Image: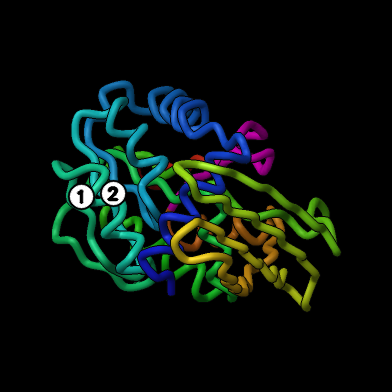
């Protein structure tokens, strides 16, 4: 769970790493409108600090977010006061309405570590999707594209604060375990250290496709951005 400061640090460091939220959101819109040109409403599941949601807000008439972490949801809400940002779990949320588009970005779907959990979440998405709606999911890495032992680092300085992030990721069974360390320095507080661990499922393309099918979707895998992992684009099987 993220504290308020860590949510702010998360936002800062990913922007400094050159993540192109605008282009990723635009690619999702292109894929969505190929299926549903008149798509107007969008729910971004696991919206984090709202970086993609801010871009979707420019591309669709009505948007909303869902985020498990309360501090991250508060950060997203502060950035988009006119947009509903709900605190909830992708596995069991209930918003009482449907959307033309549901998205799940940044590999967040991988936090569901089992096939049953993956199918369950996708069924929950289906409950909130219009009959002719479109689901767009940015997967985590496939087992064959994941780099065991991968190390990444970035440093950013904004407004008198310097943040450094270093991560190390290793395969652990059917998941990747990523250890992330942050050093944060400013004149008032000196240097502080934050650490978090992420366990993220390594599902094959075939397992993703089977889960989409079990949840009632016809799905295509599109080998485009975001983040080099491609995009699953699904529509209800009856749609």
Quadrant, the C terminus: top left
Q: Which span is picked out in magenta?
A: 217-231
Residue 66 included in the magenta stretch of the image? no
Residue 117, given in percent of the width and then of the height, sits at 49, 74
Residue 137, given in percent of the width and then of the height, sits at 50, 47
Please say whether residue 130 is visible from this viewpoint.
Answer: no
Quadrant, the N terminus: bottom left
Label 2 crowd bin: few (<14), some (14–19), many (20+), radius 10 Å: many
Contact, CB < 8 Å: mark 2 with mark 1?
A: yes
Count the labels in the image. Answer: 2
Please say whether residue 197 is visible from this viewpoint.
Answer: yes
Label 1 crowd bin: few (<14), some (14–19), many (20+), radius 10 Å: some
Which of the two residues, 52 or 143, is positioned nearer the viewer here?
52
SS type, badge 2: strand
Residue 48, given in percent of the width and then of the height, sits at 40, 55
Question: What residue is disc 2 on?
Answer: 129
Question: What residue is disc 1 on?
Answer: 98
The Cα atoms of the two marked residues, 2 and 1, are separated by 5 Å
* Residue at figure coordinates x 53%, y 44% from the top left: 219
Can you say whether 68 is above or below 144 in the image? below
Instruction: Say whether disc 2 or disc 1 marks the residue closer to the N-terminus.
Output: 1
Which of the two residues, 146 or 179, is positioned nearer the viewer here?
179
Q: Kindly indicate the quadrant of the structure image that contains residue 216.
A: bottom left
Which of the two residues, 201 or 16, is positioned nearer the viewer here?
16
Residue 227 included in the magenta stretch of the image? yes
């Amino acid at each position: 769970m993220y504290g308020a400061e860590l949510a702010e640090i998360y936002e800062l460091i990913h922007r400094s790493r050159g993540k192109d939220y605008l282009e990723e959101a635009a690619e999702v819109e292109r894929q969505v409108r190929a299926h549903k040109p008149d798509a107007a409403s969008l729910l971004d599941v696991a919206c984090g600090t709202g970086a993609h949601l801010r871009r979707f807000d420019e591309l669709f008439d009505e948007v909303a977010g869902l985020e498990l972490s309360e501090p991250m949801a508060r950060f997203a809400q502060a950035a988009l006061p006119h947009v509903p940002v709900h605190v909830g779990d992708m596995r069991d949320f209930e918003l009482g309405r449907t959307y033309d588009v549901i998205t799940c970005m940044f590999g967040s779907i991988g936090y569901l570590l089992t096939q049953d959990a993956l199918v369950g979440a996708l069924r929950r998405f289906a409950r909130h999707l219009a009959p002719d709606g479109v689901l767009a999911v940015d997967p985590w890495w496939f087992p064959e594209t994941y780099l065991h032992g991968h190390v990444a680092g970035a440093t950013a300085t904004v407004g008198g604060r310097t943040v450094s992030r270093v991560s190390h990721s290793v395969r652990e069974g059917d998941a990747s375990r990523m250890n992330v360390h942050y050093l944060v320095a400013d004149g008032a507080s000196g240097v502080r250290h934050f650490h978090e661990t992420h366990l993220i499922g390594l599902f094959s393309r075939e397992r993703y496709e089977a889960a989409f099918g079990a949840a009632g979707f016809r799905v295509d895998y599109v080998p485009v951005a975001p983040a080099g992992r491609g995009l699953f684009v699904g529509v209800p099987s009856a749609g």
